[in-house]
Image (cartoon, rainbow, N blue to C red):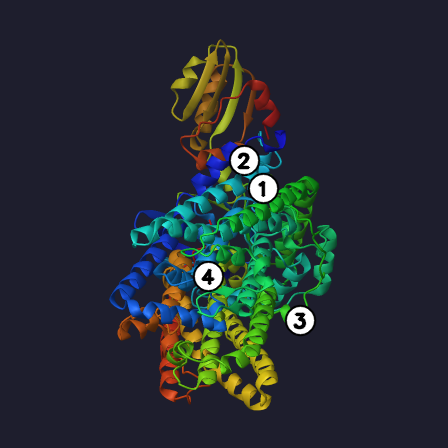
Amino acid sequence: MTTAITVSGLVKDFGASTRALDHLELHVESGEVHGFLGPNGAGKTTTIRVLLGLLRADAGHVALLGGDPWRDAVALHRRLAYVPGEVNLWPNLTGGEVIDLLGDLRGGLDSDRREDLLERFQLDPTKKIRAYSKGNRQKVALVAAFSSDVELYLLDEPTSGLDPLMEGIFQGVVQELRAAGRSILLSSHILSEVEALCDRVTIIRAGRAAETGTFDELRHLTRTSVVVDTAKPVESVTLLPGVHDARVHDGHAEFSVDPGELNHVLEHLVDLDVRSMITSPPTLEELFMRHYGESIAVPPRDADAEVVTAR
Amino acid sequence: MSGFTGTVRLIRLAMRRDRITLPAWILGMAAFLAATTAMFADQYSKHPQLLEPDTGIVVENPGMRVLGLVTGTSVGGYTLHRDALTLAVLAALMSVLAVVRHTRQAEELGREEMLGAGVVGRYASLAAAVIVTLAANLVLAMLLALGMVVAGQPAAGSLVAGTSIALVGVAFTGVAAVTSQLASTTRGATGLAGAVLGVAFMLAALGNMLGTVDSAALRVTSAWPAWLSPIGWGQQMRPFADNLWWPLGLAVLFMGSLFWLAVVLVGRRDVGRGMWPERRGSAHASPALLSPAGLVWRLQRGTLLGWAIGLLGFGLVFGALSGQIEGLEGEATEWYATFGGDADLLGAYWASMMQIAGMAVAIYAVSLLLRLHRDEAQGTLESVLATAVSRLRWLGAYAVNALAGAMMLILVFAVAMGITGGQVLGGTTTLLRDLVAAALVQLPAIGVLGAAVVALVMLLPRLSVGLSWALVVFSVFVGPMFGPSLGLPAWLLDLSPFTHVPNAPAVAVSTEPILGLGLAGLLLSTAGILLLRRRNLTLPA
């Protein structure tokens, strides 16, 4: 099995003082939908522009569909389609004209598929680009990309501005492409979308890959939340290694546990005579918050919320 | 008056945004006028006996009257004849761009929506834009006058002179206020105002050319078309002679009525839309659009058509004037002989007209090639280069369009001039053949400027627009139209590609300058291509 995208040790500087990408690692297997997550300014768009050969890597190795994205840009671009994060198109062309133009410049598009997508996304192709709303401009870019049958789709926040109905249509199209064995790199901030679509994710922060893997793998790296009521006083649990953010009063305790320490904590709790207990794996939000910014504290939540969000 | 609520705040916003732009325009124009005034003042203090015959040239020669009017003998008046048209066009452009920037462009970019959601009246943006632009024109009048006074000219005449230029800016402030309501895009609003400027120039030029000269050959009474044009009104103030103030009233009245019309139009339309409704277009692209060159053609064909109509008009008029040139006698012949490089007056006239058209067409080519930078800065390039289009093919699409467009425009001008010239003088076939050849030899110089713009866009993308226009202005001013009469040294003249254009049809075309220009163009474009292949694109964040 070949890999669709291999990026290792990628460095990209803008001027002497700004390091946009700092030894980034990113591996997308053929046929997978790979989520690309990170806070604003983390380097997602820069990475995609390097992958498109629009920016030149300062150091590191970048391979796209087995080729060099800088040297073989034109040949590689026949085999991929791109949806930019900020859709800048020609204001005086119609949506239909832009879809045909971009498809043709890529090497041709499937006109049946074009009609089908226009229908599904409910897009009027006779309007001028300047007359479309932000969401509709986004749809033009999506239809233009998905109308071509290519090996790899690079999608940079493709659903910002889409309504929930259209978000659903988008997810349907991506599922079809995955079923057809296409590779997709999906940069997104919409966690439910990433969870619904992606096989694996890479979380990027400050130009580095902070984490990569399947959701289960990522969850295993993250603390589990525990809410417990015991017959005996529970204070002693706060002294155990791997227990964090503990709040205790009487026989009630709420805390989080490092993944490797959960068994020790459970052994200790059994001795305290557990009356009721809820453990929940980290939510996606917690997962991302941890990576998105160390300085941004996750607000403590009450027990009701814990139960509601428990998975 | 709640429609104007917030105008004062918006004026401050506009002044903050324009704190570099407007002063740069005004100071540049004032410095240019002061410098040329000082130059002519120096020249005529050394050779005072030349002033009267030189004035006679520009009064008697209908072709020179296209540039403006001179009344009586004065250094100030003579200088203004050389500078007035350039300055008037610049004042009009400054005003149009400023008004459009704060009205239609703000709407197109969605800024107006944010402002309109605040405590801001419906007409506040328009009023603020117009007030700021009028204030800029007031300052312009003062500084132009100051520039001439500093260069030793009488104060009263200088003030009238400055006002006669700023008056055009005032009139076009009103024009832009209306076009910003009619068109729904920045380009549309600017283009429409530019078309009005072209018509205004044509009317003033026509009125002056058809005017009658008094017996002393020191005063032209313009024909009626000049009175229909704001540029004409400025000229009728006759600075340094009659010093008339009342034509300013015409401009203020004109501006006031257009502003009132714009206010009425604002009240009748939706924010973000023009008075002309947005039409639907085709759901499918035509095959002609489906290539980078086809895309560029599609994006600029409207502009090209506008240029073609303008050059067609000028060509027809200048051709028809050939008869009057033939009848010309005395000093007026010398200017053409110098410019056109031949004692044969008609040949020299045609050669100079072809060169002026060549410079105009170069402006078209440069403005088209600067879209290379806009594609990059505005981000449309990202979508194109993410397809199987190479950087070189993208550049090639622009180069082909610029070259083909320039060729078409200069040929339109040559053929139009040949047709009416032939009507007047006979021998249409020979004339057409000569003029078409003369048109084609203009292309290498245009190509050099275009290649220089490409190299600039690739080397210094962020500065390329300003530098490219500076290069155009420089090439025109040290070129054959102004350079020799300004007494500039030969090495400086040689820096302009226009200096090397053969004086066809007056003089037989030699191959050396053509080859030299071709080589320079080749070197510059190769540099541009090499730079383009290596560099990062400066796309929007």
Q: CA distance from mark 1 to mark 4?
A: 66 Å
* Mark 2 / mark 1, whichever is N-terminal: 1
What residue is rendered at 48% in x and 54% in y?
Answer: B237
User: Label 1 lies in what chain?
Assistant: A
**Amino acid type of disc 2?**
Leu
What residue is rendered at 66% in x and 57% in y?
Answer: A95
User: Label 2 lies in what chain?
Assistant: A
* Mark 4 / mark 3, whichever is N-terminal: 4
To which quarter of the image does residue B472 belong?
bottom left
Question: Given contact means CB atoms under 8 Å apart, are the residues at marks 2 and 1 in contact?
Answer: yes
Same chain for mark 2 and mark 1? The answer is yes
Same chain for mark 4 and mark 2? The answer is no
Question: Given contact means CB atoms under 8 Å apart, are the residues at marks 4 and 3 in contact?
Answer: no
Q: Of all residues shown, which one is farthest toward the top?
A: A250
Under circle 1, the secondary element is helix
Same chain for mark 3 and mark 2? The answer is no
According to the picture, the residue beneath numbered tag 4 turns out to be B85
